[in-house]
């Protein structure tokens, strides 16, 4: 494998920065920068739930995702003007919603919805994984606000959650791909994992050449290492100690939710 365009080693994340409470009005918000990918994540608490949850006492966490027109080299059309969302947009916002729901006690949220908005300001690969990582900070603050206001009786977040991209480039498993690397990768994989090391989602595809089980295991190891670093940054951003641990999941405690 030739040297990466930004000089990183194959197991290095891009420079990551999370700015907490980036938006003044949102119940929770964060600006996440992963290299040149920049995403604003915000959380809004609504006192209602989708129809299928009416009269259940159960809450919901969902997400919307969009790219600003000049977040890429060529202008991206606003999907609202087209009258429908692209398949890619729908898939990403469902992924973000699924990921965040997996670490929230929905039964204790009450009949409320926490709506996460992910707006991509600059896209250079890994926008969906950056959105998940940044959205957790916004979600955490929104739920802490409910707790401080006495609207819930305990913290509803069971674990940290973050995500990162991994790929195989010229046969070498590589962490946190920028757009240039992603476009040329033989394998493209997105990994979502909790702070306690439990897998939430693996999206992996051979783009050009099939990959081996050994390469998959190496990608999972790289992804886990990257997510551990991202969770550490989440803790620092939230002013939590490095050894802070939420309740986590036991081996027989599986998060469940309808899609």
Image (cartoon, rainbow, N blue to C red):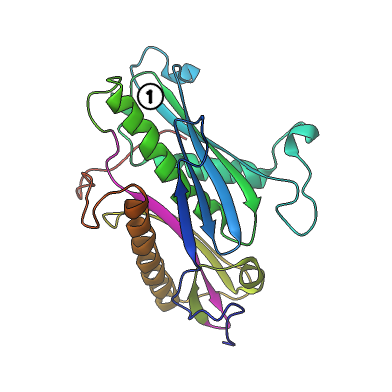
Image check: 130 left or right of 156?
Answer: right
Residue 233, by quadrant, is bottom left
- Residue at the limit of the structure toward the bottom, as seen here: 2
Helix, strand or loop at mark 1:
loop
Number of marks in the image?
A: 1
Q: Is residue 82 within the magenta segment?
A: no
Q: Position of residue 126 (x, y in %)?
A: 56, 59
The residue positioned 48% from the left and 79% from the top of the image is 10
Q: Position of residue 66 (x, y in %)?
A: 64, 42
Check disc 1 and report the residue beneath it: 59
The magenta region covers 156-171
Q: Is residue 199 visible from the viewing direction of this image?
A: no
Q: Is residue 187 above or below residue 200?
A: below
Pick the quarter of the image with the N terminus.
bottom right
State the residue in front, 117 or 18.
18
Q: Residue at x 51, y 82 (%)?
A: 172
Please state which of residues 83 and 162 is positioned toward the viewer in this rendering: 162
Whether residue 182 appears in this view of the structure is yes
The residue that appears at 51% across and 79% down in the rendered structure is: 8
Which residue is depicted at the point 35% across and 32% down?
143
Percent position (x, y) of residue 18? 46, 53
Residue 236 falls left or right of residue 93: left
């Amino acid at each position: 494998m030739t040297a990466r365009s930004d000089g990183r080693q194959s197991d290095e994340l891009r420079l990551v920065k999370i700015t907490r409470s980036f938006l003044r009005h949102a119940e929770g918000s964060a600006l996440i920068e992963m290299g040149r990918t920049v995403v604003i994540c915000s959380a809004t608490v609504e006192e209602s739930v989708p129809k299928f949850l009416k009269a259940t006492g159960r809450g919901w966490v969902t997400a919307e995702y969009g790219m600003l027109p000049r977040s890429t080299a060529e202008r991206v059309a606003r999907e609202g003007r087209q009258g429908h969302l692209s398949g890619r947009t729908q898939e990403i916002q469902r992924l973000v919603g699924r990921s965040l729901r997996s670490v929230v006690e929905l039964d204790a949220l009450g009949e409320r919805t926490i709506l996460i908005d992910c707006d991509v300001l600059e896209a250079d690969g890994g926008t969906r994984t950056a959105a998940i990582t940044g959205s957790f900070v916004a979600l955490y603050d929104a739920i802490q606000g409910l707790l401080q206001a006495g609207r819930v009786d305990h913290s509803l977040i069971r674990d940290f959650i973050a995500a990162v991209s991994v790929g195989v480039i010229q046969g070498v498993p590589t962490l946190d791909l920028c757009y240039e690397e992603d476009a040329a990768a033989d394998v493209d994989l997105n990994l979502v994992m909790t702070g306690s090391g439990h897998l939430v989602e693996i999206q992996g595809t051979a783009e050009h050449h099939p990959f081996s089980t050994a390469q998959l295991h190496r990608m999972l190891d790289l992804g886990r290492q990257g997510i551990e670093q991202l969770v550490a940054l989440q803790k620092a951003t939230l002013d939590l100690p490095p050894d802070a641990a939420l309740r986590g999941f036991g081996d027989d405690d599986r998060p469940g939710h309808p899609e």
